[in-house]
Image (tube, rainbow, N blue to C red):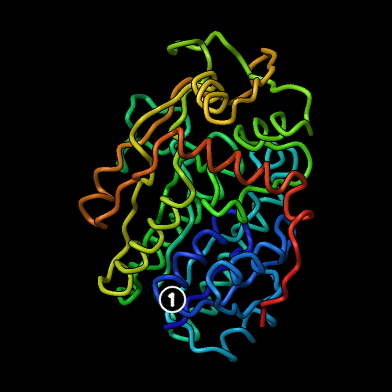
């Protein structure tokens, strides 16, 4: 059974590749490598001792995308591909709308043409915007506050509309919260380009000495210590959530949405303290102004995923921090410091 992963060379994609291969699936990876590295796929091959069929293709390239469907018998698609930096989406909204939405439209048109109608879509908790209450449920109000979040929300609506006249489509929409952590081998992790946008790689790069100190955006929120509270989920738990969603779309028609989170929020300072405990590294930080659009508290209710998918997040915050540090310590320069082993087809 062959699964196509768009954006499969990225952080969440590669961890999902490992879980799919370990579960016996054949995988095909499509990625334009704009924010990822083929070395990550080499690591996946080494860890699983299995080959990966890889295409360096952009979703906006309809001709080469269709060639993938011509050359392979694809049973389902897990759709990760898309631009994802909130700040950049505010600076270049047209670029984000065109890339994320048009790419998805092209993908769905080709899937329909080749009668591939099982899809797991990588959405985001950003579709909820500023929550009126926490925990956040799947039927909580949707009000994305930036272009990135709005692209995810619009794609969700497109997929729901696609299902109405085509009830043979099976679609799972996964809204995940804040993925952190890394593969326990230390070979695979988050490798952002430039200064990280996300908290954990920022912390680990301070820990390894690449950055001088952590900037904490605001300490006057109505939270336990004044810093923002988020639902952090281990990337391996998140990858296993995609496996469960894939099982669902392979067996049950319909379109449905699931939160993937732990159901518990941690503040920025709590994450820093947990990281310091497991790494034995002191993380210097400074408090700076809040970022526009940031919210005080955001965490999930993931009961539906437990009941409908049989999935639950199992890894705790210390394991998330330990695995993040293990990756950074073993790969101080990210995939640049990984050996190239050439196991890609």
Q: Residue at x 64, y 39 (%)?
A: 86
Q: Position of residue 33 (x, y in %)?
A: 73, 63
Number of numbered markers: 1
Badge 1 density bin: few <14, some 14–19, many ≥20, Cα 10 Å: many
- Local SS, label 1: strand
Q: Is residue 243 left or right of residue 144?
A: left
Q: Residue at x 55, y 34 (%)?
A: 145
Q: Position of residue 149 (x, y in %)?
A: 54, 43
Above or below for 13 versus 193: below
Above or below for 221 versus 134: above
Above or below for 308 versus 343: above
Foreground of the two, 155 or 251: 251
Q: Position of residue 260 (x, y in %)?
A: 38, 46
Dot 1 corresponds to which residue?
76
Foreground of the two, 87 or 56: 56
Foreground of the two, 316 or 185: 185
Q: Residue at x 31, y 77 (%)?
A: 168
Q: Residue at x 33, y 34 (%)?
A: 263
Q: Position of residue 176 (x, y in %)?
A: 44, 46
The residue furthest bottom is 71
Classify residue 292 by image quadrant: top right
The residue furthest left is 307
Which quadrant is the C terminus positioned in? bottom right
Classify residue 70 by image quadrant: bottom right
Foreground of the two, 272 or 85: 272
Above or below for 45 versus 130: below
Which quadrant is the N terminus positioned in? bottom left
């Amino acid at each position: 059974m062959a699964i196509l992963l768009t954006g499969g060379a990225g952080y969440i994609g590669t961890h999902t590749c490992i879980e799919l291969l370990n579960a016996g699936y054949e995988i095909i990876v499509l990625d334009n490598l704009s924010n990822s590295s083929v070395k990550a796929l080499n690591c996946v091959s080494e860890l699983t001792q299995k080959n990966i069929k890889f295409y360096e293709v952009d979703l906006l390239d309809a001709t080469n995308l269709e060639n993938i469907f011509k050359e392979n018998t694809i049973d389902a698609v897990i759709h990760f591909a898309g631009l994802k930096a909130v700040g950049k989406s505010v600076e270049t909204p047209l670029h984000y709308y065109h890339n994320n939405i048009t790419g998805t439209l092209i993908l769905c048109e080709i899937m329909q043409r080749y009668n591939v109608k099982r899809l797991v879509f990588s959405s985001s908790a950003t579709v909820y915007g500023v929550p009126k209450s926490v925990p956040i449920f799947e039927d909580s109000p949707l009000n994305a506050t930036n272009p990135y979040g709005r692209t995810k929300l619009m794609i969700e609506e497109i997929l729901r509309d696609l299902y109405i006249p085509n009830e043979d489509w099976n679609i799972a929409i996964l809204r995940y919260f804040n993925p952190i952590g890394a593969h326990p081998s230390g070979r695979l992790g988050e490798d952002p380009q430039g200064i990280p946008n996300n908290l954990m790689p920022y912390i680990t790069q301070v820990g390894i000495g690449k950055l001088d100190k952590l900037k904490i955006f605001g300490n006057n929120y109505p939270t336990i210590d004044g810093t923002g509270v988020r639902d952090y989920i281990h990337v391996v738990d998140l990858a296993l959530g995609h496996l469960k969603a894939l099982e669902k779309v392979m067996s049950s028609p319909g379109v449905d949405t699931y939160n993937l989170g732990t159901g518990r929020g941690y503040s920025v300072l709590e994450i820093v303290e947990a990281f310091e405990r497991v790494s034995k590294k002191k993380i210097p930080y400074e408090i700076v102004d809040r970022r526009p659009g940031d919210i005080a508290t955001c965490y999930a209710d993931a009961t539906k995923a437990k009941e409908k998918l049989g999935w639950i997040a199992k890894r705790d915050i210390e394991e998330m921090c330990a695995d993040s540090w293990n990756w950074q310590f073993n790969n101080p320069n990210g995939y640049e410091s990984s050996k190239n082993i050439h196991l890609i087809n």
